[in-house]
Image: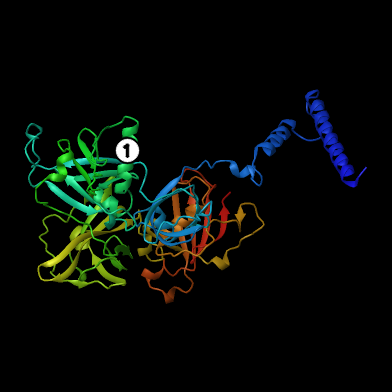
Amino acid sequence: MSKRNFLILVLVVFVVTVSATIFAACESKTQSDGKDGNDVFGDCDELAHYITDCKTNEPGEDRYNTVESELPPESFVGTVVEEDTYYMVVEPNVDEEEYEISKRIRVEYLHDHIDYLYGIGRKVVITYIPPMAGGTTITTDDIRHDGFEEFELSVQYRQDSIPARFAEIQYAGILTLVANNRDFDEYASDYNLYYYGLHDVYVTVDGNTLPLKEALNYGKVTIDGIVADCNRRAAIGEIEEYRYKDGGSVVFDFGDYKIIKYHTLEGNRDVYIGDSNMDINAKNSTAVCIGAYLWKDWGLRLEARDVTNKGATIVFKQKGGNITGDLDTGEAFYLEKKDGNKWVPVDTKPLLDYAFNMIAYMLNKDGETELETNWEWLYGELRAGQYRISKEVMDFRKTADFDEQIYYAYFEIPEQDICSYPPYSSNNEGTTLKCFDYESLNINYDAPGVISDGFKNTERTEISDLSDVVTLAKNECTVEYDTVSYAVDIGNTETFTIDELCSKAEMYEINFSKSTQAGGDQTVYIDKNGVTQLIVYGE
């Protein structure tokens, strides 16, 4: 017998012996009550499941990693600032919750994107299963460049729209040019979006309702995505569609409004959203566009820093874009508060007669411009909630030759602006910022309930105020709570002003507890770099 045949024979004998042993052990298990020690391999059912898993799993696949997470997926919109075939780095929109976690998030792909890159500067929708690794990295291949998949449009008719009984009469003065598709995405196809007989179009997406122009600008939806949704809904019979032999134009009928996607032999690819009277001849209207609002890319983004309930620093960040003159802004501003899915104006002080100074502030190109803004004199102290401040920006070429656009900076007033209080006791314990000395804590690291490793916040994260720290601490929290308390280790208090206490703390102590029970709390210690150092569970 050759050596090769001998080895094969030994292997066959080994497999038969192991199989017989397992079979005998399982037979013994079924004939006993499981307490006499005959089940030498433990639970035979469990062993059988393991053998089945080994047969069905792909080579190299970890069967334990095939279990789906119980956490629901999260999505956000961000701008691609860096990318390769195996990862990208995105900046979340300022109105996204992920922006509060990290100003930049690394997205690692599940597979190497050898043949496709999304494009620097492009808006993308990232869907992932939380939490983020270290608070700044996620792994997913669910990346869309055509906005959120689920959304709903609604329209607001113009007051001067022609009644249906006069539909055969030519429309006059109700055609509005909204924007060119490339104004929102430089990588997209070149065609225009028009409103026909409508005052405005709104979209409900990602839990919010906002004007379509704004949603397009922030990448929450795209015109291509809207057309794709029309085709999908028409295919399943949700809406009516009418196709024309002019090259492939389609009219989608939603009942109270219509959408036309032109595809003519002459090369017209424009999209029209119009009232229920609009038909395929809308493109032939001789009406002069009125109220045209063509969004222009000026490479500008607004951010609110050092926010208090009395004011903030509004930062104008400018880079790239298509600017034809000089960018400037004035003193005027307006505040809106988020109410459900809507933004509503904040009431000004009653009986206040006010006006803004006519001053122009030049905005730096390829840099930042900061404007201190105080709104207490106009709106009073803001209550807790989500807000946005609007600023009008002008691309000024010369007198009577300029363009204007509205930009927003989003911010939040927390339930308690605790950083504005001194670190000494007051009559109101709820407004006391307590201090502690981390090095003097008497911690028994071997005691149950003391965790010193395996944390989620392991990478440096910028901390601008106490709310950033609380957000990080929530990543580590594993107990039910209805109360959050804070303390800071500020070292030598004589070297800091009150305003600097939160931003220059050496260590933060965040405690999560329930007011209805004693014990069962959790305290998270986070250093000034946003890295978790210690977690202590209460008894």
- Mark 1 highlights which residue? 231
Q: Position of residue 174 (x, y in %)?
A: 11, 46
Q: Position of residue 385 (x, y in %)?
A: 31, 52
Query: Label 1 neighbourhood size at 10 Å, few (<14), some (14-19), many (20+)?
Result: some
Identified at 20% across, 34% down, the residue is: 256
Q: Amino acid at mark 1?
A: Asn
Residue 405, image quadrant: bottom left
Image quadrant in which the N terminus is located = top right
428 or 293, nearer to the observer: 293
| 522 sits left or right of 368 in the view | right
Q: Position of residue 267 (x, y in %)?
A: 24, 49
Identified at 84% across, 31% down, the residue is: 20
Give the farthest residue toward the top: 31
Residue 320 higher or lower than 28, as above or below: below
Residue 447 higher or lower than 277, as above or below: below
- Residue 383 in view, yes or no: no
Give the farthest residue toward the bottom: 495
Identified at 88% across, 42% down, the residue is: 5
- Residue 217 in view, yes or no: yes
Q: How many marks?
A: 1
Q: Position of residue 453 (x, y in %)?
A: 61, 58
Give the farthest residue toward the right: 1
Residue 471, image quadrant: bottom left
Callout 1 secondary element: helix
| 365 sits left or right of 530 in the view | left
